[in-house]
Amino acid sequence: MRVLLIEDDAMIGEAVRTGLRQDGFTVDWVREAEAGDAAIKAEAYALLLLDLGLPRKSGLDWLRELRRRGIRIPVLILTARDAVADRVAGLDSGADDYLVKPFDLDELSARLRALLRRDTGRAQPLLEHGGLSLDPATHEASYRGATISLSAREFTLVAALLERPGAILSRAQLEQRLYGWGEEVESNAVEVHIHHLRKKLGADFIRNVRGLGYTVSKAQ
Amino acid sequence: MTASIRGQLLAWLLGALVIAGLLIGYSAYHRAQEDIDELLDYQLKQLAFSLSHQSVASAPMPPGLPLPEPDFITQVWDKDGVQMFYSRPNLAIPLRPRPGFSNVEWSHQVWRVFTQLDGFRIIQVAHPLSLREEMATSLTRRAVMPLVLLLPLLGVGIWIIVGHALRPLSRISSALRARTPSSLEPLPQQDLPEELVPLLGSLNDLLQRLNRALEAQRHFVADAAHELRSPLTAVQLQLQLLKRAASDDERTLALTRLERGVQRSTRLVQQLLTLARQDPQEPRTDRESVDLDRLAREVIADFEPMAQRDRLTLSLESQGPLDFRGDSESLRVMLGNLVDNAIRYTSRGGVIVRVRERDGSVVLEVEDTGAGIPAEERARVFDRFYRVPGQKIEEGSGLGLAIVKRVADRHRGRISLDAGAGQSGLRVTVELPAGNS
């Protein structure tokens, strides 16, 4: 899951990025709204994490602008303003959720997962398909009733495919999901992870569509 | 009854009326006496004349007749001193041979006597003086009595009118009672007697100043509460990352970051307290003599380790001892903040502190070779919690220059910012008027 964090406070940004990465998110971090604009144009993000106290431009104004431009990425606001009026203003400006500083990393992750579920139209917290069950909260996976162990990257990769069964994701799209900015992309990484996944899930679980990418079959 | 305006007015006005009444009574009594004397003397005289034109029977009145006793006594003698007539046989005032008016004491009373000689008769008419006094007293009583009767009525009237006139006072006091620290709007000033307008003006002025001070305080607390959340958020997140750390390397990194977060929180709290202590509302009278040269040397010594760590040169340009009357602790905090900022925002080069005298002012200057502040940001950097966008410094509290400004304000000084001699760094010049002792 690729997440864009817009936060001007260096310490908070650093800590949120580290924590969310540990929870399996891919995090890009910018410190100003202008840089956020550029990032949104360049990458496809599943979520925006927006701090309201940004320099130069208020986070709320930027959010309203995004919504006016028709950008519908779910947005979670991080802010030090805790008055009810502020929360109402935040949600009415187009935010999907609101978290007041100081907050808990685990709660932040849980809220991000809930937002993603809502966005992909799923009600239950587990991702399930063809006998494979993934719990994004705990990173636990089970296949045909038996617990299997997946590395963080393997988990992210197969979760991306399970979100929309039948859809074909290109190697570049998968790499985007796996690596944030500044993280070095190992060559053939996607192929290597797919190889490992096929060993654990069987050769047919993930199909390779030649020249296009990878998919899990819609009906199994 | 401690100095009730109503009671005092009542007592003084009634007292004045009583005194006026006594004076009126006194003068009325005297006027009446004079008038009565004149009138009754005239009457005595007329009576005597009228008798002299009558041919009085030579025979005395038969005694014992039950006649009403008049106030007057009339006696007639012939020129040989033989009494020819007397009106009151039992009251026979001795003959006064001298003509005209005289007072005669006789038979336990004083009598007013008029004696007339008309050639062959002596006519003497008299009445007691006490009669005159009775008349004067009764006349005076009639003049003063209405005032005495009116006195209680006037008292009630004064009580009511004064109470009515004082009603604006009780209106003001109940309006004042309704004021709370959160509602300090001015008191209504319409329909006020002229005398109360200045009082209300001063009260409203006080309320306004109080309101401004409270407002500033509220803003400060709100700002502080907001700003404290950032370092606390960082610390909480860093602590969670520390708990999550799986390897020694991760743990060491997390600990280092946590330590920086705690340092940042500590610094922010210290700066907040410093700023609160430099409250501009609080008048400072404890001006002492400060040697700015020595103060600058001490501050430089304090920051030398920090400058060495960052490989910066920290130097002083001064022409020797320079006395200034001011608050040495505030001045130390101010210079310390300037040097601290300069070191933080400078990565290469150095920081110069200058102390000098110019046109009756002392000038403290701190110049660095750092990134500087863009001209368009310079006006805002003195605002509380304002940080120049794009600065990479994360420990900044956003309060340093606000504190500098406040100390300068309290010494009636001026601050100016420019890029300095090298046109690249930042030069902060604080000019403090010296003649403020």
Image (tube, coloured by chain):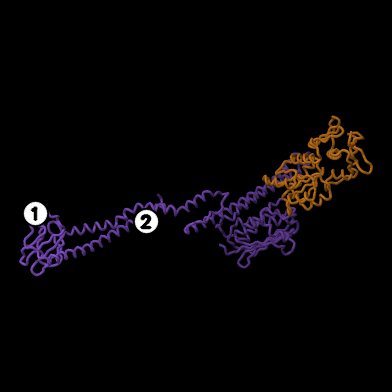
| Nearest to the observer: residue A159 or residue B233 | A159
Q: Quadrant of residue A3?
A: top right
- Residue A164 position within the rendered picture, expressed as x and y whole percent measured from the top left: 85, 39
Quick one: SS at disc 2?
helix
Which residue is the site of mark 1?
B64
Asked whether, in this view, residue B411 is left or right of residue B341, the answer is left
Q: Residues within 10 Å of mark 1 (few under 14, many from 20)?
A: few
The colour one sees for chain B in the rendered image is purple
Which chain comes out orange in the rendered image? A
Asked whether, in this view, residue B268 is left or right of residue A189, the answer is left
Which residue is the site of mark 2?
B13
Subunit that carries the residue with mark 1 = B
Give the quarter of the figure containing the C terminus of chain B. Answer: bottom right
Instruction: Look at discs 2 and 1 and give the one toward the viewer.
Output: 1
Kind of residue at badge 2: Leu
Can the viewer see residue B3?
no
